[in-house]
Amino acid sequence: MTSASLSSSPLPQPRPYSSDSLDGPTTLSEIKQLQAVLIKAGLAHTRPAQNRLVALCSAARPPDPALDHALLLFSRSRKPTPFMRNTIVQSLANTSAPHRALRFYSAAHRAAIPPNHHTFPALLKACSHLRALSEGNQIHAQALKSGLGCDILVRNALIHLYCSCAALDHAQRVFDKTLERDVVTWNTMINGYVQNGLACEALDLFRDLQLAGVRPDEISMVGVLSACAVAGALELGKWAHAYIEKHQMDGRISVKTALIDMYSKCGFIDRALEVFESTPVRNLVLWTAMINGLAINGSGHRAVEFFDRMVNDDGIKPDGIVFVSVLSACSHGGLVNEGTRLFDELMTRYNLVPQMELFGCMVDLLGRAGRLDEALELIRRMPLEPGVILWRTLLGACRAHRNVEIGELAMKEIQRREPGHHGDHVLLSNIYASVGRWEDVAYVRRAMKRMGISKEPGCSIIEVDGRIYSFVVEDASHRYSEEVRAALERMTRRLREAGHVPDTREVVARVEGGEEEREEKLVHHSEKVAVAFGLIRTVPGTTLRVVKNLRVCVDCHAAMKLISEIYGREIVLRDRNRFHHFKSGSCSCGDHW
DNA sequence: ATAGGGTTAG
């Protein structure tokens, strides 16, 4: 094969900037041309030619037709090579039907064709995609039996498998027993922790990587940035950014994407925009990160603007994911008309079939805007069987708009599908509380107790001097240090002096507990403890950044506003869904969350 | 010679 033989066909041009190109190197028709040339030259049946053709198929875009062609080549081959076989397993593992990889392998296994150290990573990858822990365990056992259990590729794939299946203890065990770790080993474990929401563990592991004298690469840095995004750790994220620039690792679009995501999720939207504007070539994922950043930081109009820019200026076709972001921007910003327009275009202009999540966005959009009847109508008329999440979204909207009637209806639907989810009962209780129906509040709480439903403990983290401190509400005052206890007491006193009246409507305390006990619970809400800690550990005027795992309660929200005023501090509080920027006594969310 | 790890939502 010569390059001249393909010179008339349009070969993919080298990308000027990004190494994460969206298009594969070759199309199927180019592969077929090459194959024709090889046949004419009488080389088509040689091993290198067959290997090369299959490899090209597996790298082609769009992959599926090329993959079928690879399977054809394989079936017609008189003597398929292990390379062909492994490449096909690999490609099948990366499709939307990864179990085909396992089936393909079983056929070889039955024919007593031995696997090699490239077979197992591909099979394990298929299991990772399928979250198939037991199949993965079997393959683990086979790898050990084949004597390939020590191979670094196999071990890395095993770590990846266990992380994908949320079996972090298994992953950690394989990691610990892997003594000759390479950078991929570290990256797999770090990203595994991040993907399971364990940011602190991921960051600790990154420090271990450095202590072990391993040089982090771009993917290590993506992992660190994701961890910072999860934890809301801006200072560490800035450090990582500086490190990336110092070592010239900011060329990849995935690094830029991770930076945008990190700054957005740390509430530093201006820096996210700077990174975005400094990126010359943008793809869908990068745009999505930016649009989502605008969405969660409350810039609804700009999110829609960026979405239009992406489509019109860059000619990028949106997918379901970016639609989730832009529609959630619309619902937080109350942009009902824009949201409806986009939802229509989703089908008419982009030929996408809306999935459940997108109906969820629309229910949220209508519900938040107070158009509860329309939201209910949409759920009833949608072509899919509405999932529990849609009803839950509607229930949340009923809380915001104090609608008992539709709220009760939504709750019934939820209970039929998934009883025992604590948040639903809390929401219903809050709806009753918001209209003063205290007997019903008490009833819900008794029901929760009877059903043995407990509340997920609130947890807040705050970063001070590059270290992350986390505070969990469950074990109240006796677990705090003397320093934290005293700080919390002082802060509570100052709040009272400034006229803060505890608002216990959203406290789900034991019914027999009196008002005093419920007020006491409020004091110990984790975001208050984190802020009290931040107030004493940072110099006056420093912005406090807190990340909470649950939605912020009405009392904490009011308290934060007051704290921002009396202490002259900005507080950026990220809750389960969104940001609250407290400044001079008010909040960016306009008290709607 | 070719075969591994990463980014966006919920």
Image (tube, grey):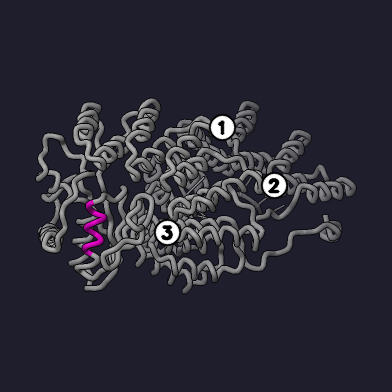
Residue shown at the point (45%, 64%) measured from the top left: A215
Q: Nearer the viewer, mark 1 or mark 2?
A: 1
Task: Give the residue type at disc 2.
Answer: Pro
Q: Are marks 1 and 3 in contact (CB under 8 Å)?
A: no
Dominant secondary structure (helix, strand or loop) of the stretch shown in magenta: helix
The reply to whether residue A87 is in sight is yes
- Direction from residue A165 to residue A530 in the image, left or right: left
* A132 lies above or below A229: above
Q: What is the chain letter for disc 2?
A: A
Task: Give the residue type at disc 1.
Answer: Pro
Disc 2 with disc 3 on a shared chain: yes
Sequence-first disc among 1 and 3: 3
The reply to whether residue A181 is in sight is no
Q: Position of residue A412 (x, y in %)?
A: 36, 28
Residue shown at the point (64%, 42%) measured from the top left: A91
Residue behind mark 2: A62
Disc 1 with disc 2 on a shared chain: yes
* A413 lies above or below A456: above
Chain part drawn in magenta:
A555-563
- Direction from residue B8 to residue A582 in the image, left or right: left
Residue shown at the point (61%, 62%) measured from the top left: A19
Q: Estimate the spatial distance between the alpha carbons at disc 2 and disc 3, rounded to whole Å.
A: 36 Å
Residue behind mark 3: A298
